[in-house]
Amino acid sequence: MNFLEIKNLKTFFHTRSGTVRAVDDISLTIRKGEIVGIVGESGSGKSVTCHTMLGLLPQPPARIEGGSIHFHGDDLVNLPHSALRAIRGKRISMVFQDPMSCLNPFMTILEQVAEPLIIHDNLSLEEAEKQAIEMMEKVGIRDAEKRARSYPHEFSGGMRQRVMIAMALVTKPDLLLADEPTTALDVTVQARILKILRSLREELDVSVLFITHDLGVVAEIADRIVVMYRGKVVEQGEVKEIFSNPKHPYVKGLLACRPTLDCKYGTLPTVDDFLETIEHENGAIEIREKKNIENTLQKLVETKKNSEKEQSDPLVEVQNLTVRFRSSKGFIGEKTEDVLAVDGIDLTIQKGKTLGLVGESGCGKTSTGRAILHLIRPTSGEILYEGKSLGKLPAENLIEYRKKMQIIFQDPYASLNPRLTIEQTLTEPMQVHNIDNNNSSRRERVVSILEEVGLSSDHLLRYPHEFSGGQRQRICVARALAVEPEFIVCDECVSAMDVSIQAQVLNLLQELQRKRQLTYLFISHDLSVVKFISDDVAVMQAGKIIEFGKASDVYTHPKENYTRDLIDAIPSPYNLVKD
Amino acid sequence: MVKFILVRILQAIPTLFLIATLTFFMTRMAPGGPFDSEKNIPDEIKEKLEAHFGLDKPLHEQFILYINNLLQGDLGPSFKYMGWDVSELIAKAFPVSAQLGILSLCIALLMGLPAGIIAALRKNSSYDYFLMISAMLGICLPTFVLGPLLILIFSSWLGWLPPLGWYSFSDMILPSLTLGLFYAAYIARLTRAGMLETLNQDYIRTARAKGASPIRVVLCHALKGGLLPVVTFLGPAFAGLISGSFIIESIFFIPGLGRFFVTAAFNRDYTMVLGTVLFYACLIIILNLVVDIIQASLDPKSRGR
C-alpha cells in the first residue's frame, strides 16, 4: 500500500542570480513499513524534497511550482499551515544531519524529547516525561532516567543523534524523514545508529525515508533506493537490483568512483567519465552516457599494476611522541585537567610513500599530524626529518623545514582566507620563503601550479567564495605546493566531500605524488579511502598506535580486534551483493 | 558558585587600587587647586585651609594617607561642601540618580525588547523598517536635543508634565523618558540582531519540524539565546544609568550624582572626584558580576566555568 505518494513535485528557488530548479519534476512512493533511501550528491535536491514535504522551506525564495504529495488522503502541498503543523512531529517526523547544532543548547534533553508529546498529545508533563524516557531507553541511551536532565553539550555526537531519533519517534509517527543522520558520525557509531533504526522500524512499524550521499550506508539500511541527480530522479529500484545492475550512467559512475576495500582501480573513475550533460536554453538538462566507458575504465585499472612502490629511506621519523593539552580553569588556576591526546607513539614515513593514519574522532590523529609539523609543540618525544631532530632547532632554522612540510586541512571553506584572491593566497607562502623574488616569475609559477591542480589562470583574481567545495580543496592543494614541499600532511582532506569530488581529489593527490615524488601522511576516519591511497597504514586508538603495517596486510589480516571492528563497520554495498 | 564570586571579588581589589592611584595623581596633575577660584582669599587663610586638608604635605604622603583612610572605608571630607563627607554626599545624591536610572531602564526594556522581537520576526517588512529607523533616530539624537524637545512638547505646548525639578512622580517622567529612549533604541537593535541569529539556528528548524507553533518557537526556543547579547550589554549600561547622567540632571535640575561629579571635577574637589570614581568602579564591577551570573543561568554551557 502506498501511503505516501509524491507526484511530479517541483520546488524552485527564485534568487537574484536566477531560478534554481532544486527539485525538478520528481515522483516517488513509500509503502507502509518500508525504508526508502534517497541517494545523491550535495545540491541534488534530496534535502529540499524532505523539507518540502514538511513545509520547512523558507518561502520565498523557495516556491513549489507544481505537483502533489499525498499522505493519508491529504495533499501536503496545499494544506493550510495549521493542519500541516498537526502532521509535523506527530505523523511525519524528521531527524537532521548535524546533531550538534540541531538540538537546542538551552533546553535539557528531557524537555526536548518530551516536547512533541506536549504539543500534539496534550499529555501532562509527568506523563510526557515518562514516555520520553522510555523512548530514550529504546534508542539505546543508558541511564536515560539519570541523564535526561543534562544539556546537549554534555552528550557525545552519537548520543545526541540517538536523542534526535528518540525525539522524532516519541509520538509514534507513521513516517520518519532521516536527512543524512549518520554523516557526521564515526563509522562504528554509524553502524550502531543504523542498527537501532532498523530494529525500531520493526518495533514501531514506521516507514523511513533515508537521505544520504553514501551508497554504502543506503545499502545497509534501505529496501529500495531512489537516486537523484541535479533535481531529478535518475533511477529507482530494489537495492540489489541497483547495485548489481545499474542502468543510468550517473548511478554507474557513483558506484565506481567510491573507493572500496577491494578496489581494482589504480586511479579512481569519476562521474564525469560516465556521462555528459547538455544544458538547453530553457534551463532543462539532458544527461547522456559517454561512449567507450569500458576502455576508459580498463585504462584506470591498468594504472594499478605499476603502483607497487619499492622500499625507500625514511623521510620523517616520529619517536615516542606525546602531546598533552593542559586546560587550566579559572584565574588562580585551581583545577587543571590534562588531556593526553597522543600517548608516546612511534611512526616512520618513507620517502615517496603514503602513510595512512586512521582512527575515530578524538583518537589523537590530528594532534599527531600537527605535532609532526610543529604547529603544536610536542610535550615530549622527537620528530626527525631526514635524520635531523626538529625539536632542537632554533626557531629561525625551523622555517627551512616549514618550506619542506605542508598541510592540507579538512574544511576548504574555513582554511582559505575569504579576503585574499587566489593569487594572493598562493603567493604569500612564496614571499615568506623568498621563492622567485619578482612578481612576474611568481605569477608564472602560480599559474603553472594552478594548472597542475586542474584550475586555470582565469581563476587568479577570484575570491574563495566563487568556487565550489572541490575547487577550493584544489586551491588548498595548490597552496601547499606553492613552496615545493617534500612532505604533505593531508588532515581529513576529502572527508567533507561527495564521493565523485572525493575521487577527483584523491586522483589529483596520487598524480602529484607520482610527478613530484611527494610523501604524504594521510589522516582520515574513512578506512576505504585510506586503503585506496596508502602504502602503509597505522591504526590509532586513544592516543596510541595499535597496529602498523603494509596497507594490504592490515586490511586482510588485522591483528587487533579494534581494527577488525573498524573494518567490519564500513558499510559496503558489496557485502550485500555477496550474501 | 561561591568560589566564583569570591575569586571575582579578589580580582576586583587590584583593579580598584589601580583606578584609585591613577585618579589620585591625574587630579593632582591638573592645574589649579580646590581653593584657587574663591575670590580674594587671603594667602594666610588659604594656607590654613590647605594645612587643614593636608594639602601642604608632599604628594606621596598625601597618597599614603588617602589610601590608609580608604582602607578604613573613609572617603574623606569634601573640599568644597564644607562640613560634608564625600560618603555622605554620595549617600544623598545616589538614590536620586538610581531612581532615575531604574525608571529609565524599565522604559528601555519595555520598549526595546518587544520592538526588537517584532522587528526580527517580521524581518524586512514595513514594521521592521519603521522600528529600526526609529531606533536609529533614538541612537543618533543626543539627549541634550531630545530633553529640551520633550520639555517643549509636553510642558510648554501641552502642559501635561512639569519641565524640571525632582519632587513628585510626574517630575520623573520626562527625564526618565529622555534617558530611557536612547537605551530602548540600543536594546531594540541588539534584540533584533540576537533574535535573527537565533532564529537562523538549526535547532529552530528542529522545533518547527516537531510541529511547534510560531509562538512556541519564539518563547520556548529562540528567546533565551536571542537575549544573551542584551544581557551582556545591560551590565555596564545599568551601571551608567544609575550612577547619574550629568546632561539629563542639568537639563531637568535634578540633584543627582552626575551633577555632583562634574562640578567636583571643575572645582578640583579632589576627594569628591576620587570618591565618585571609586563608587562608579565598584558599581560596574558588581553589576558585571551579576550579569555573568545571569548569563550562566541562561546558558548551560558557560556554567561551571
Image: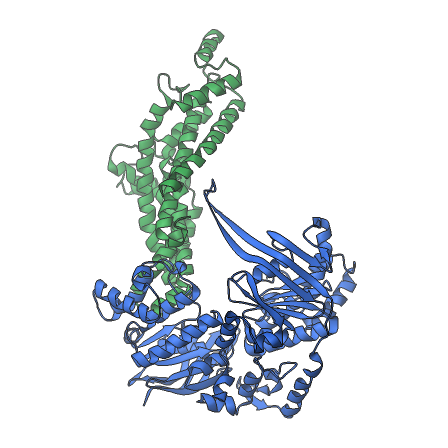
Chain colours: A blue, B green
Observer able to see residue A457:
no
In the image, is residue B68 above or below residue B45? Answer: below
Residue A160 coordinates in the image, percent (x, y) = 39, 65
In which quadrant is the N terminus of chain A drawn?
A: bottom left
Residue visible at 32% across and 27% down? B91
Which of the two residues, B277 or B3, is positioned nearer the viewer here? B3
Which of the two residues, B159 or A494, is positioned nearer the viewer here? A494
Q: Quarter of the image holding residue A417?
A: bottom right
Residue A242 coordinates in the image, percent (x, y) = 49, 89
Q: Is A184 displayed left or right of A539 in the figure?
A: left
Q: Quarter of the image holding residue A370?
A: bottom right
Residue A140 coordinates in the image, percent (x, y) = 35, 69
Q: Is B21 displayed left or right of B164 in the figure?
A: right
Residue visible at 74% across and 71% down? A516
Q: Is B263 displayed left or right of B111 in the figure?
A: right
Observer able to see residue A382:
yes
Which of the two residues, A403 or A156, is positioned nearer the viewer here? A156
